[in-house]
Amino acid sequence: MHIAFNGWFWNQPHVGSGQYLRHLLPALRAVAPDLQMTLVLPDHIRTFDGLPPDVSIAHAPTRFKGHLGKVWFEQRAYPAVVRRVQADIAHVPYWGPPFNTKPARLVTSVLDIIPLTLPAYRGGVRAKLYTSMVAAAAQGSAHVLTLSEASKTDIVERLHIPAEKVTVTYLAADERFHPKVGREGDEAVRRKYDLPDDFVLCVSGFDIRKNVNMLLLAWTYVGPSVGQQMPLVLAGRQPQWGTPRFPDLPDYAKKLDIERFLMWLGEFDEADKPALYRLAKAVVFPSRYEGFGLPPLEAMACGTPVIACDVSSIPEVTGEAAYLVPPDDARAMGAAILAVVVQDDLHQHLANAGLGQASLFSWRKTAQRTLDVYQQVMEA
């Protein structure tokens, strides 16, 4: 069996689709040593770090730059290479499938369908046309993979794909997210970012879906109690503030009079993320919609208690091991944070439960489930 993967996001390891692909290929090689795999790359990608052994590389010309180049690669260049290498299955690991990969069968990983579920993310005319195109193409897939039962429900309802053609393959935290692996370097990370002894951490983007504005409002209840000794550290690259998708959160914090209780960490080195989780007293993840939601799982794998919202895929990921609150209840969020950081027994309970929950997920399971789908598609 020969699988040809769309590798458009290979050189973007910090983007969800890039992370997914870079973890999936080594995991597939581990569970299926004889599986033939080809990674199809646009011609501008010439670095192959992290590629597992015996995975072939095939380049395809993009011809155009920017968004048009991406669409050309997805719809013309990638399918042409799939046919050239005579792959049995064309696997597109993100929501960007081509209309035709024949004679290869098409498997599409739809990580989420945010543009269809959240109006603010639908964009302009060009974005809407692209969404309509890939939605129609996904319907022609032999099978669709997704990351949670919540996403599967959205796909069945919004893309009108039969439930039996959609399989959930959960993600997992990388092995470096661990209570002790690499812990000897944690204090160096603390000094690098000038972090206090105690802090609550939020690792997030700042678009409206991430719901950080609700967390800031919740901090009006937390800050006066513990904020001077235990600030909220907001980690992540800051956008251009003051747009419909990125409201001006620093200005909002100023209006709430909680600036003195906050630390805007900004963009950080990905290699430092496990240490940031381990150093934090607790991790807060206020997002209101996720295809999977990897940060809570990563934090739990590090042994750090998690407070999050009980929406979309988050309850599937955290199980009973996190303190979940409604996504619009800032008072409940504030109370949850205070309870976790002040009550030692609750803090320890969530830390232990999180380690157990995180252990239920593994990339080996993801790969085996994916391989089962490949075999099912070939037998159909």
Image (spheres, helix red, strand yellow):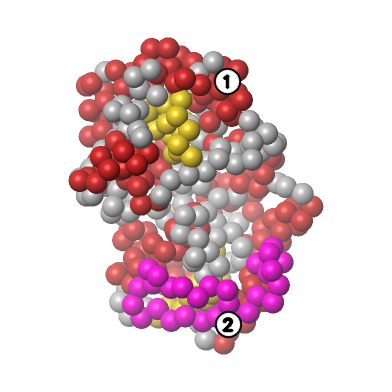
Which residue is label 1 attached to? Answer: 254
Quadrant for the N terminus, please: bottom left
Location of residue 25 with respect to 219 vertically, above or below = below
Residue 24 x/y as whole percent = 40, 64
Q: Which amino acid does label 1 sit on?
A: Lys
Location of residue 371 with respect to 187 vertically, above or below = below
| Quarter holding residue 62 | bottom right
Q: Using the image, tell me which numbered label, if any, was put on residue 199.
A: none
The front one of 179 and 253 is: 253
Which residue is label 2 attached to? Answer: 81
Q: What residue type is labelled 2?
A: Val
Q: Say whether residue 46 is magenta.
A: yes
Residue 3 x/y as whole percent = 46, 76
| Quarter holding residue 8 | bottom right
Tag 1: Cα neighbours inside 10 Å, few (<14), some, or many (≥20)? few
The front one of 108 and 257 is: 257
Residue 98 x/y as whole percent = 64, 70
Location of residue 8 with respect to 228 vertically, above or below = below
Q: Say whether residue 302 is magenta.
A: no
- The answer to whether residue 275 shows anywhere in this view is yes
Disc 2/disc 1 C-alpha distance (Å): 53 Å
The front one of 251 and 369 is: 251
At horizontal 60% and vertical 35% (from top left) the residue drawn is: 208
At horizontal 52% and vertical 70% (from top left) the residue drawn is: 7
Residue 85 x/y as whole percent = 52, 86
Which of labels 2 and 1 is toward the front?
Answer: 1
Q: Give the range drawn in magenta.
A: 43-71
Does 347 sit left or right of 144 as displayed? left
- The answer to whether residue 105 shows anywhere in this view is no
At horizontal 48% and vertical 40% (from top left) the residue drawn is: 266
Location of residue 321 with respect to 126 vertically, above or below = above
Can you name the residue that lies furthest to the right here? 125
